[in-house]
Amino acid sequence: MRRRGFTLLEVLVATLIMALAVTGLLSALSTSLRSAGRLTDYDRAALLARQKMDELMIATKVPKLTPFEGTWGPEVTGGLQTGWRARITPFEAPPGTNIGQPFLERIELEIWWMNADKRRSFQIEGFRRSIMTPEDVAAGARK
């Protein structure tokens, strides 16, 4: 006599195997979603950093040798608390540089954002050509 169908033990083993597979898939999916969220935050911060660096590269009336900072509104950051901190310092000035002569300035920019209770950040820097002004001399930019 031939039996058709599955025994209770076979059904339980198959159910256990399926439960393990589904648990593994859900765990992988959760990790992927967390990574995608983190990458989205970094991508948004990189875009904001590029925008702020472009602004600083062309800005002429910014403090030099002194850190200055600001924040972005939630409409730009997707609701995350996000800000920046910058500092412009002389990088290279030929010996004997006087007022009206060109020299290089370094722009150091830190972008930060809050992810849950952790503060995340990264730094970028850029260089621009500038003309020595009396303010630069007074601030000690001449080497």
Image (tube, rainbow, N blue to C red):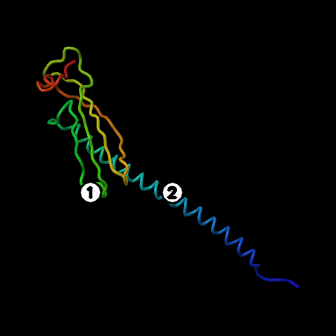
Residue lying at the far front in this picture: please name it: 117
How far apart are labels 2 and 1 at the CA level?
26 Å
Q: Is residue 64 above or below residue 118?
A: above
Q: Residues within 10 Å of mark 1 (few under 14, many from 20)?
A: few
Q: Position of residue 127 (x, y in %)?
A: 28, 31
Residue 79: image quadrant is bottom left
Q: Position of residue 14 (x, y in %)?
A: 70, 71
- For image coordinates 18% across by 38% down, the residue present is 59
Q: Position of residue 28 (x, y in %)?
A: 55, 59
- Residue wearing tag 1: 74
Residue lying at the far bottom in this picture: please name it: 1
Which amino acid, by three-letter code, is at mark 2? Answer: Thr
Relative side of 77 to 97, left or right? right
In the foreground, 139 or 104:
139
Q: Is residue 1 above or below residue 77?
A: below
Q: Quadrant of the C terminus?
A: top left
In the foreground, 5 or 10:
10
Q: Position of residue 33 (x, y in %)?
A: 47, 59
- For image coordinates 24% across by 17% down, the residue present is 94
- Residue wearing tag 2: 31
Residue lying at the far right in this picture: please name it: 1
- For image coordinates 86% across by 83% down, the residue present is 2
Q: Residues within 10 Å of mark 2 (few under 14, many from 20)?
A: few
Q: Which one is earlier in the sequence, the residue at label 2 or at label 1?
A: 2
Relative side of 1 to 110, left or right? right
At numbered mark 2, what does the secondary structure look like: helix, strand or loop? helix
At numbered mark 1, what does the secondary structure look like: helix, strand or loop? helix
Q: Is residue 97 above or below residue 28?
A: above
How many labels, in total?
A: 2
Residue 96: image quadrant is top left
Question: Mark 2 near mark 1, Cβ–Cβ under 8 Å?
Answer: no
Which amino acid, by three-letter code, is at mark 1? Answer: Pro
